[in-house]
Image: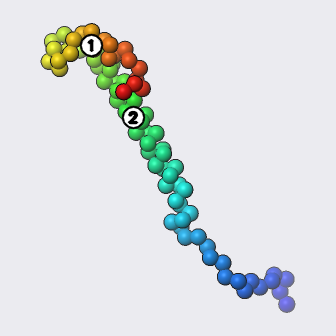
Amino acid sequence: MSAVPECTESVDLPSRTVATRPLTGVVTHLGWIWKKIWRWHEKRKSRRVLRTLTDAELLDIGITRKQACDEASRSFFWD
């Protein structure tokens, strides 16, 4: 006679796809956050470059020194 009782009922275990579904949402949100941070970084770099352009280079892209300074002074998280 065994000290462990026998189990006669069947138990349905969740599949791996059901278990990983909550992680899919987390990965999606992390991806969104990463893209947002990356866009902020790119904007910051672009605005820093505007400060270094000469008047002739600014004329080539069609903006004035005042417009370039205004854009460069904006914070990196503004669209």
Q: Residue at x 31, y 24 (%)?
A: 46
Q: Between residues 77 and 57, which one lies in front from this camera angle?
A: 77
Q: What residue type is labelled 1?
A: Gln
Disc 1 secondary structure class: helix
What is the crowding at mark 2: few (fewer than 14 residues within 10 Å), some, or many (at least 20)? few
Q: What residue type is labelled 2?
A: Trp
Q: Residue at x 74, y 83 (%)?
A: 7
Kindly indicate the quadrant of the structure image that contains residue 66. top left
Q: Residue at x 53, y 55 (%)?
A: 23
Q: Mark 1 points at which residue?
A: 67
Q: Between residues 79 and 73, which one lies in front from this camera angle?
A: 79
Q: Position of residue 58 (x, y in %)?
A: 19, 15
Q: Position of residue 2 (x, y in %)?
A: 83, 86
Say whether residue 6 is visible.
yes
What is the crowding at mark 1: few (fewer than 14 residues within 10 Å), some, or many (at least 20)? few
Say whether residue 52 is visible.
no
The mark total stands at 2
Q: Name the residue under label 2.
A: 38
